[in-house]
Amino acid sequence: MDIRLFLKAAGGLTGVAAGLALALPAAAVTAPEIHVLSNRADLVAGGDALVEIKWPAGANLALAKIALDGANVKSAFAMRPNGRYMGLVSGLKVGNNVLTARIPGGGAQITIKNHPIGGPVISGPQLEPWLCRTGNQGNPSLPGTPDAQCNVPTVVELFYRNASNQFVTYNPASPPAAEQVQQTTTDEGKTVPFIVQRVTGTANRGIYQISVLVDPTKPITPWSTEQPWNRKYYNAFGGACAINYQQPTVGNTLTSVTQLGRGFAVGHSSMNTLGNQCSDLLSAESLMMTKEIVTKRYGEIRYSIGEGGSAGSMQQHFIAEAYPGLLNGLTTSLVYDEHWGQVVGSADCMLLFRAFGMNQAGLGITGMTVNPLFPNAAERQKVWGSNPSNPDNLCGSKAGFIAAELIADTTQGCAGPAGNWRWHSVNNPSGTRCTIQDYLKAVFGVGPDGKAPTALDNVGVQYGLLSLLNGSLTPEQFVDINHRIGGLTIDGTFQPQRMQADPSALNAVHRTGRNVSGRGAAMVVEIDNRSNFTSTDFHPPFHSWTYRARMDRTNGNHAGHVIWVPNGGQTPNQFLSVDAWLAAVEADTSSDPLPTKIWRNRPETVFDACFRPGGVVLKDNLFCEGNGDWRFYASPRLTAGWAFTNDTLKCQLKPLAAADYPGITFTAEQWARLQETFPTGVCDWTKPGVGEQPSIPWLTYAGGPGGQPLGDPPKSTFIP
């Protein structure tokens, strides 16, 4: 991506050179310029960087001098087959390295800040303890003994796709007969043997894998013009959430046959699956590092497409918001707005299980008797707000994830090294804690007690309010559930009083992009395949619409967002549709802002639709009205009156007033209990949430919790 275009389109946001290569005219230079291509010059990792030097017309390059910290590195550079003067500069030390390029009359210099390949780059102090598990990686196995950051030698393999649609090891010294190798035609019209190079290595204490279509008889370099790679990148993101302190293993990128056959580089880091590790920040950092590796091996990336459902959609939305430019197209399913909203939902589930008298041994809720006011699922649905066909399943299906995120004393998840390192309130109060906020302590910091603060809050929340107002919930049920609900301590145990967000944690959630505003959505295209539209589990379909509501509020539109509902019918290919959309945007050479280009270049075949049997496509009819009608349901917070943007983490309060309950009569005793429950007032959902503020893109946590803006990417400066 040309960063100048991105900054203009984003109104000054800072990104990295890793996105839409929307071509700007190549400007002639009057003095040497140095451009670090593999990443921002201050975010390089692994000891090397792909660099281009631009010289003034007519410069005598025989007289050029190129040095790294004073040492001659000119041999790394040459005029390459692509017509550009490029080189892979190696030998970078951790920290600052000064690269200079001179000709008679002047030169340029730039500082390249190199980081360990094991990280961190932007994520701040690394989690400890950490178990290296390269020996657990299969397909392929990784050789060698890992160092302190879990690094081992990289494995490079070649495969060909045979007539049986299998990838088989390719030996260049003894290649198979040509008829045994399938042919594939890339999206650039190149018909080539289907031969793939797969690279598996370690980065950021995880394991990455990259596969790309290659011609093994030609040089595989970042400046090659003879390779079939189309310079596009596809990255998968995995679901779930686990607070683990160990190196995860990575899946097989050879399974992305369509993408590989069309010429895409396909990559994935094991840190991009929140079921391996639940830090969205580590996921974003690992994506950045994987893309840097792709660029150094194969060349610059035109644009990048993400793929993933559930927590895979959370990661894509967070990255679009907090690290714009890393992804340009999103293919999502089982969509969530973002992760922190699910943490809020998990807390509500825990509290309502208890208030309803529903035992959940894994959550420490035992010995309960059923609340007689809510004796069955139908009555509880009035507070859950969930699908009435199985209302308890909204929370019941996610009980294991709740424990993994919120309970410090949990025995679920929290895998890592052997030994007594896990926190326990009695047996090890100084141990490593296994809550989501402690896992993100580089973001939230820690208090004097060694515990990361939390942004959870339910002060003033009136559970079941909308059901009360529509007459389905009785006044006594409403009063009872709100009187019982209570809150959670920072350790995830029950307390009778409501929970209050720590101001610093609330600030961090908003500031760092964890409460996704939708701003980043204006800079990407997304197709959301709402495949589970009748789901009763913890992937309720309303999230597709609440996320869209955030876009409409923040950007005034949702021009780059499309929803598909496969209601018995077949949707188009999601990946191919996003690729076609991005290709059209890329081809638009106008000077219009990127959001305008996204809207103008949406393919005519890409639109909101319900897909019914027999090839029936109901355009702009997402609820399939008149042909397979359906509806989505809600959540406890939405049923409490939460704004439909689904993102008010702590509400502003208003006085408890009988006038706010038209047609509802409370007894004196019930009103007294409400006053006791809401001594400071109830939520005023018409006002912005407490602490709401725009997120700041491209934060680094190297300097401490809360993050600091990186600022504009470094540029080379003239030297006489």
Image (cartoon, rainbow, N blue to C red):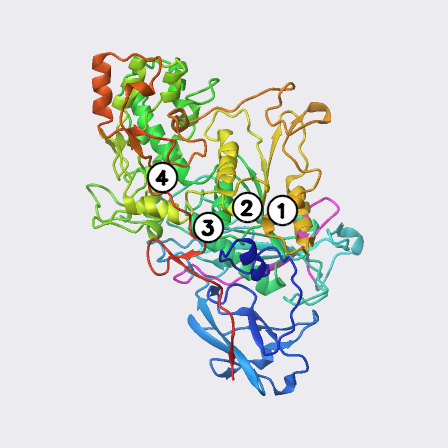
Task: Tell me which corner region of the image, top left, top right, bottom left or bottom right, holds residue 491.
Answer: top left
Residue drawn at x 31%, y 15% is 477
Q: CA distance from mark 3 to mark 2?
A: 13 Å
Instruction: Say which residue label 3 marks.
Output: 322
Kind of residue sitting beneath label 3: Ala
Give the class, few, some or many, for how many residues have Cα within 10 Å of label 3's Cα (few <14, many ≥20): many
Q: Nearer the viewer, mark 4 or mark 1?
A: 1
Foreground of the two, 43 or 219: 43
**Nearest to N terminus: mark 4 or mark 1:** 4
User: Badges 4 and 3: C-beta atoms under 8 Å apart?
Assistant: no
Q: Which residue is mark 1?
A: 598
Label 4: state its secondary structure.
Answer: helix
Identify the residue position indicated by label 4 in the image.
405
Determine which residue is flagged by label 2. 522
Looking at the picture, how far across and down is residue 589, in whole percent? 68, 56
Judging depth in this view, the residue of 137 and 378 nearest the camera is 378
State yes or no: residue 153 in magenta: yes
Using a 10 Å C-alpha cutoff, classify the residue at mark 1 as few (fewer than 14 neighbours), some (14 to 19) or many (20 or more).
many
Q: CA distance from mark 1 to mark 2?
A: 8 Å
Q: Mark 2: which amino acid?
A: Ala
Specify start and end residues of the magenta stretch as a single range: 147-172
From what the image shows, is residue 690 above or below residue 81?
A: above
Marks 4/3: CA–CA distance: 22 Å
